[in-house]
Amino acid sequence: MVYLTRRERFNAAHKLWVDDWDDEKNFAVFGKCANVNWHGHNYELFVTVKGTPDPMTGFVMDAKKLSKLIKKLVLDELDHRNLNLDVDFIPKKTQPTTENLVLSIWNRLEPHIEGCQLHCIKLYETENIFAEYYGE
Amino acid sequence: MVYLTRRERFNAAHKLWVDDWDDEKNFAVFGKCANVNWHGHNYELFVTVKGTPDPMTGFVMDAKKLSKLIKKLVLDELDHRNLNLDVDFIPKKTQPTTENLVLSIWNRLEPHIEGCQLHCIKLYETENIFAEYYGE
Amino acid sequence: MVYLTRRERFNAAHKLWVDDWDDEKNFAVFGKCANVNWHGHNYELFVTVKGTPDPMTGFVMDAKKLSKLIKKLVLDELDHRNLNLDVDFIPKKTQPTTENLVLSIWNRLEPHIEGCQLHCIKLYETENIFAEYYGE
Amino acid sequence: MVYLTRRERFNAAHKLWVDDWDDEKNFAVFGKCANVNWHGHNYELFVTVKGTPDPMTGFVMDAKKLSKLIKKLVLDELDHRNLNLDVDFIPKKTQPTTENLVLSIWNRLEPHIEGCQLHCIKLYETENIFAEYYGE
Amino acid sequence: MVYLTRRERFNAAHKLWVDDWDDEKNFAVFGKCANVNWHGHNYELFVTVKGTPDPMTGFVMDAKKLSKLIKKLVLDELDHRNLNLDVDFIPKKTQPTTENLVLSIWNRLEPHIEGCQLHCIKLYETENIFAEYYGE
Amino acid sequence: MVYLTRRERFNAAHKLWVDDWDDEKNFAVFGKCANVNWHGHNYELFVTVKGTPDPMTGFVMDAKKLSKLIKKLVLDELDHRNLNLDVDFIPKKTQPTTENLVLSIWNRLEPHIEGCQLHCIKLYETENIFAEYYGE
């Protein structure tokens, strides 16, 4: 079992805001992240798959194909978008925190990985904060 | 003459959009950067001052004081904000490109540097794009 | 189960030296790390917690609260300090190696993590050496 | 159980090419990586061992000794070499993909780790692609 | 005058070898870099242009157009190639050192920069070595 | 004129402390950096030389020779040392700030650069602070 990881990047706007709470509670809980006019990040995404290297190609999965799959399914929907407003596969009413984003990206990608298994979605929001999800 | 540089970071939303142009021209010129609902970045800011190290302290400028000055004048206004809507010191109708931001940040900081001179404002928008301004 | 990691940094002096050994043996075992007048590092600390994201906030743990906890319990005691002399929570006679530091930091932090679980303490001593501890 | 990781680097040429396939199939499968006259990479290698820190030295393994072992067994054979032609411990007819290289490096190093256990071989081929192997 | 920099990357094989010298002299001067079967690097290229930001777009130069120009003129010829054998715009008999490569890349790009000026070509060969050329 | 830069690293202890001042003034001016028992850093040093690439070798200066020179003259004296106590070429009574260190390292190296010219000494103290000196 060998693990192969591909890094991709996207830039997006978001805010953290619970509609059922008043302004005061939102700012108390989320601080600057609740700024009404949004803020944004350069997200750095690491997708890890696992499997046995093919005896002919030496690939667990062709890294170029993995990259194209991530671009089509994830980046084309998240890059230069607003994570609260623009993205169909992020459930509405769900806060676009790094923790919830790794869950959404896992669910988006997992059914399309063929010939090996999705192992981990890791997402950096800043150089100081990242989240990981391993499917359970 | 010794140069001292302090790195700071801020996260902000923006879009590139000329109000006098129609949608078609805006998307033709700015592409994804014109997304109506904004996108955002982790900006990395490098402020360089130059001068002679003080014979007692060995400081061109106390890096902690430089950091506090940048935080008060620049980060408190840009961090977790919308660069098109929320920032008084960025001229309205000016596109918040990396090139224009280094000019605005220079003009904001320069009058407040004491005991040495501001030498350069350098700003990373992504790991692949940055701009620099040296005051002329 | 989602994993959330927060990066923090501290700068400290230390040396590796066994009091029960003579100079010759200390230098034979520890080399330059036994320099009598100390040396030091920029340490980079990664604290990982795990849990279920809160359905309202989307947080496994508020990253700002995690950061404050690390600052209060760990950084305030380690940053700009001598790891052999100045830190109460590092057992005396224990070498302040990266391996032992992750154990001490785990023991220091673990009882204070609430609402989720501490998963990993990872510490970089240089860009080429780091240690990890998972609690067992 | 504490994990200790040492980073090393080497620069090498390689290409991906199956001798039993014709040119057309090789370029269809491997694209630019099949360039007849080779291409190359700055490889970044992370070797992780695990064990209990020695009560006197605080070492899982002396990081300098680990570094020397990696240099002698791995870097002296891979650095500034052609991975298809010059390296005895990479099986001929095996493609020198990142996935296969972590397997070869594991097999090369594992019998020589004493006093603790080899835990992981992780290898970056570019900043966007890396592979990991944990011994099974 | 504002400076705008775009980072690009390419992976290539090369060796340092003077045909007019015998093997002994080549290995004495170039060491491992003279390995007969080549070695290679992940090159990191920084192209800096300078000019006045356009009053409407805020661009010194559209960074996407700059990227496309670099890809067409430089990366398409260098990426996944052998710098000694495969690249028309590197003069034969010239050693493909980092110093000579920045000169070749400057000469290749400079005539095609329109609306602003090429300021600097900076090229990393490894994380420890880079060269810069400013056109004179 | 081409510029060639070599990165090196060293780890050292230091403190900022003016003997002619009392404790109160030292802590007021230098804060945590005045910790009596020292602290330390992973310093990252960039040495830049400039000249014309040799027509045969393509070298402004052999990067390996530059590295050896830096190791012998600078790193062997600074690495795993105390910058206040252990280093002959840092003037006593001079604070070992990043600004003063680039001056000392310039003066130490400059007379030994042959066949090209020393252009810049750049030194990172942390990822957020660095100083540069260009010889005047």
Image (cartoon, coloured by chain):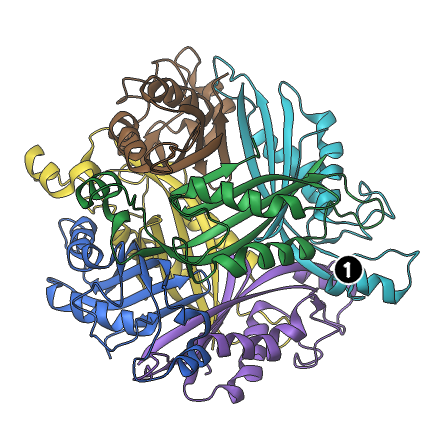
Chain colours: A green, B blue, C brown, D cyan, E purple, F yellow
Residue A64 lies left or right of residue D51; in this view the side is right
Q: Mark 1 lies on which chain?
A: D
- The relative height of residue B134 versus residue D7 in the rendered view (above or below) is below
Q: Mark 1 points at which residue?
A: D30
In which quadrant will I find the C terminus of chain F? Answer: bottom left
Q: Which residue is drawn at 16% across and 39% down?
A: F31
Classify mark 1: helix, strand or loop.
helix
Q: Residue at x 55, y 77 (%)?
A: E68
Q: Residue furthest right?
A: D20
Image coordinates for residue F114, horizontal then vertical, percent:
47, 66
Q: Residue furthest front?
A: A20
- The relative height of residue F47 versus residue A108 in the rendered view (above or below) is below
Q: Which one is nearer the viewer's eye here, A40 or D136?
A: A40
| Residue E31 at least partly seen | no
Which amino acid lies under the numbered mark 1 shown in the image of this protein?
Answer: Phe
Q: Which residue lies furthest to the top in this view?
A: C20
Image coordinates for residue F74, horizontal then vertical, percent:
41, 49
| Residue C99 at least partly seen | yes
Which quadrant of the figure has residue E94?
A: bottom right
Total numbered badges shown on the rendered structure? 1
- The relative height of residue C123 versus residue E47 in the rendered view (above or below) is above
- Dot 1, how many residues are within 10 Å of its Cα: few (below 14), some (14-19), or many (20+)? some
Residue F81 lies left or right of residue B70; in this view the side is right
Q: Which one is nearer the viewer's eye here, C3 or D81?
A: C3
Which quadrant of the figure has residue A97?
A: top left
Residue D47 lies left or right of residue E35; in this view the side is left
Image coordinates for residue A50, horizontal then vertical, percent:
68, 39
Q: Which residue is drawn at 37% across and 23% down?
A: C105
Which quadrant of the figure has residue A38?
A: bottom left
Image coordinates for residue F130, horizontal then vertical, percent:
31, 54
Residue F63 lies left or right of residue C22; in this view the side is right
